[in-house]
Amino acid sequence: MALGSACASAAAPPSGLTGRVMIGPTCPVQRLGERCERPYRTEIVVLRARDQRRVTLFRSGSDGRFRVRLTPGRYVLEAASPGLPRLTPLQVTVRAGRFTAVTIVFDSGIR
């Protein structure tokens, strides 16, 4: 009996965000078949959506990939540094027991 109750009180599975950070455009003129985005290594600030309080900061790898644990809720993702490249704040929702997949795209400013 004790074993059953211990299993029932186990912690909830982790949740958060996983995905990739990209930057683009990376070429002044895009040609057919040419990719004008590339992975971007940077820092992202996570704010709680309801009050804009900072929750954490995470870094993407050189391949642009990231994985960050967050409790379920609504969040806003922002660039850690202002200016170019620019990130329009991105609203995301984290659900219990799941990692929400998201692609974060920075604007390089190339036109």
Image: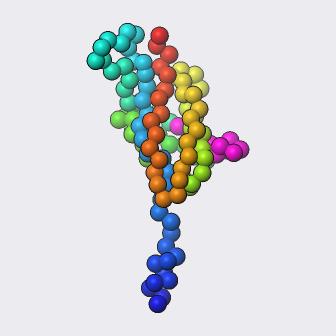
User: Is 106 placed left or right of 83 in the picture?
Assistant: left
Q: Is residue 44 above or below residue 23?
A: below
Q: Position of residue 48 (x, y in %)?
A: 64, 45
Circle count: 0
Residue 54 appears in view: no
Q: Position of residue 5 (x, y in %)?
A: 50, 83
Residue placed at 37% from the left, 19% from the top?
36
Magenta span includes 50:
yes
Look at the image and name its color scheme. Answer: rainbow
- Say which quarter of the image contains residue 25: top left
Residue placed at 52% from the left, 76% from the top?
9
**Extreme bottom residue here?**
1
Residue 79 appears in view: yes
**Extreme right residue here?**
51
- Say which quarter of the image contains residue 32: top left
Q: Is residue 2 above or below residue 70?
A: below
Q: Is residue 35 above or below residue 69?
A: above
Magenta span includes 53:
yes
Q: Position of residue 20 (x, y in %)?
A: 41, 37
Q: Position of residue 97 (x, y in %)?
A: 48, 59
User: Is 50 placed left or right of 85 in the picture?
Assistant: right
Residue placed at 39% from the left, 18% from the top?
26
Q: Which residues are magenta?
A: 44-54
Q: Is residue 23 above or below residue 102?
A: above
